[in-house]
Image (spheres, rainbow, N blue to C red):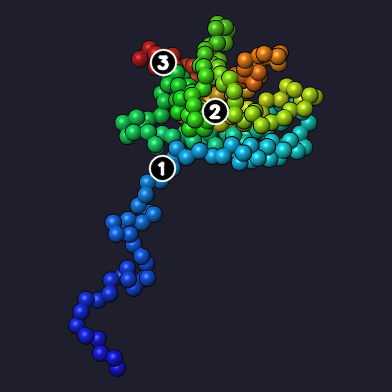
Amino acid sequence: MAHLGPGKAASSKEQAGLRYPSNGKTIYHRPLNRTKTAELSQSSFAYLFSEMVSYAQRRVTGIQELEKRLNLQGHPIGLKLLDLLLTREPPRSQTRPLTIIALLHFIKINLWTHLFGRQADRLEKSSNPDTPDEYMIVDNEPLVNAYISVPREMSQLNCAAFVAGIIEGVCDGAMFPARVTAHSVGGKEEGEMWPGKTVFLVKFQPEVLEREALIGKG
C-alpha cells in the first residue's frame, strides 16, 4: 500500500481540476449588465426583423391585421424591458413612473436609448380638447423601417407597429393601460427631409386619466 507522507491535503479546487484566475474571480463574478452598451449588428437585426415581418404576414387579410400581429410581437418585449431598465437604474431611482409624463419621458429617453442608441425626437400632447388622453412620440427615422421594402399596394403599412407594441407593453407593465399605434406622417415628395417620419399615438384608458386627476388633487 502506498504511504502518504505528511503534507497539506490537496485543495478542492485542485481535486476538481479547475483552473482559477489569480484574483479568484470567475465568469460568474461578472455583473450581468457588463455588456449592456454592446450594439447589435444592423445587418443581423435587418435579417431577423424581415423574417418577423414575413412570419406575421402569413394568413393575414389586410394591412390592419398585419400591423396588429406586429404589435402583438412587440408587446411582451415591452413588458420585460420595463423591469430590465428599472433594474439597471441607480437604487434611488428604481421606482416605476407614477404619472403619465414621467412614464412617457421614461419611454422617450430610457427605452429609446436602450433600443436605438438615441432618444426619440419629440414628445407631444394632443392639442385637441376632445382627446386629452392622447400623446404622441415622434421618431423621424425609425430603424425598423430602414430595411423594409413596402410594395405599392401596401403603401399604408408601417412596420413600426412592432415598436408600438413594445411601447404598449411598457405602458401596461407600468399599470398605465393604453392603445399604441404607429402612423406614417413623412411626405414622399422629393427633397423631403424625413420621408419615414413616424408618430406613435398613445391613447390611455379612462381610468388612467381618473387616477392622474386624483394625484393632481393630492
In whole angstroms, how far apart are the C-alphas of marks 2 and 3? 24 Å
Q: Type of residue at label 2?
A: Ile
Residue placed most toward the observer, 21 or 218: 21
Circles 3 and 1: CB distance less than 8 Å? Answer: no
Mark 1 burial class by Cα count in 10 Å: few <14, some 14-19, many 20+: few
Q: Quadrant of residue 135?
A: top right
Q: Quadrant of residue 169?
A: top right
Q: Of label 2 and label 3, which has the lower sequence position?
A: 2
On the question of residue 170 being in view, the answer is no
| Mark whose residue sits in front, 3 or 1 | 1
Q: Quadrant of residue 161?
A: top right
Residue placed most toward the observer, 192 or 98: 192
In the structure shown, which secondary structural element does the residue marked by tag 2 occupy? helix
Q: Residue at x 32, y 68 (%)?
A: 13
Residue placed most toward the observer, 175 or 104: 104
Name the residue that disc number 3 marks: 214
Q: Type of residue at label 1?
A: Asn
Q: Of label 3 and label 1, which has the lower sequence position?
A: 1
Residue 6 image offset from top left, x and y in percent: 19, 83
Residue 78 lies left or right of residue 85; in this view the side is right
Residue 83 image offset from top left, x and y in percent: 45, 36
Label at residue 167? 2
Q: Residue at x 71, y 40 (%)?
A: 55
Name the residue that disc number 1 marks: 33
Mark 2 burial class by Cα count in 10 Å: few <14, some 14-19, many 20+: many
